[in-house]
Amino acid sequence: MRIVQATLEHLDLLTPLFVKYREFYNELPYPESSRKFLEKRLRRKESVIYLALADDEDKLLGFCQLYPSYSSLSLKRVWILNDIYVAEEARRQLVADRLLHTAKQMAKETSAVRMRVATSRDNEVAQKVYESIGFIEDEQFKNYVLPINSD
């Protein structure tokens, strides 16, 4: 497996797996909107997306998407690991581990103070993967969400 940073040329390969990721979280697929969303992120350089590709072909095994943020307290960059997904047929092949190690290396190279990730409370598989990479549960801050309706 090889890890590459996504470009606009990867949109046709990435979009179907991104749609499956959304469906995993019980969202409607919206393939066209999903493609446009990814295209905007890449075109505007608003996120970094890593792809795990099979060695022998251009088959997408998984992806992760990170967004830049900043910490006013530490005066440094923070990376938010917003999305990570591994194709069902590629699970248990350390795809997520490779993606996370690549993201961690990029965070170091950009002098980030930390990476942040959130997952469902019941997603124990993801929690174990994050902990195996070195993520620790935040006990200093409690996170809140303010829903904003688009109506």
Image (tube, rainbow, N blue to C red):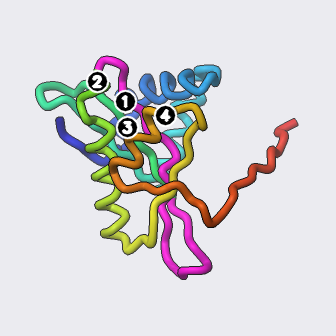
| Residue occupying the point 19% across, 29% down | 54
Assess whether residue 72 is covered by the magenta stretch. yes
Assess whether residue 91 is covered by the magenta stretch. no
Residue 119 locus on image (x, y percent): 55, 41
Q: Quadrant of residue 135?
A: bottom left
Judged by depth in the image, the label closer to the viewer, 2 or 3, is 2
Q: Quadrant of residue 151?
A: top right
Pointer 4 residue: 124
Q: Secondary structure at mark 4?
A: helix
Characterize the local packing of mark 1: few (<14), some (14-19) or many (20 or more) Cα atoms within 10 angstroms. Answer: many
The magenta span reads: 68-89
| Residue occupying the point 48% across, 50% down | 81
Judged by depth in the image, the label closer to the viewer, 4 or 1, is 4
Q: Secondary structure at mark 2?
A: helix
Pointer 3 residue: 63
Pointer 1 residue: 86
- Three-letter residue code for mark 3: Phe
112 to 127, vertically: above or below: below
Pointer 2 residue: 90
Residue 55 locus on image (x, y percent): 13, 31
Alpha carbon separation for disc pair 3 and 4: 19 Å
On screen, residue 142 versus residue 4, left or right, reads right
Tell me the number on the disc at residue 3. none
Instruction: Please tell me which residue lies in front, 124 or 12.
Output: 124
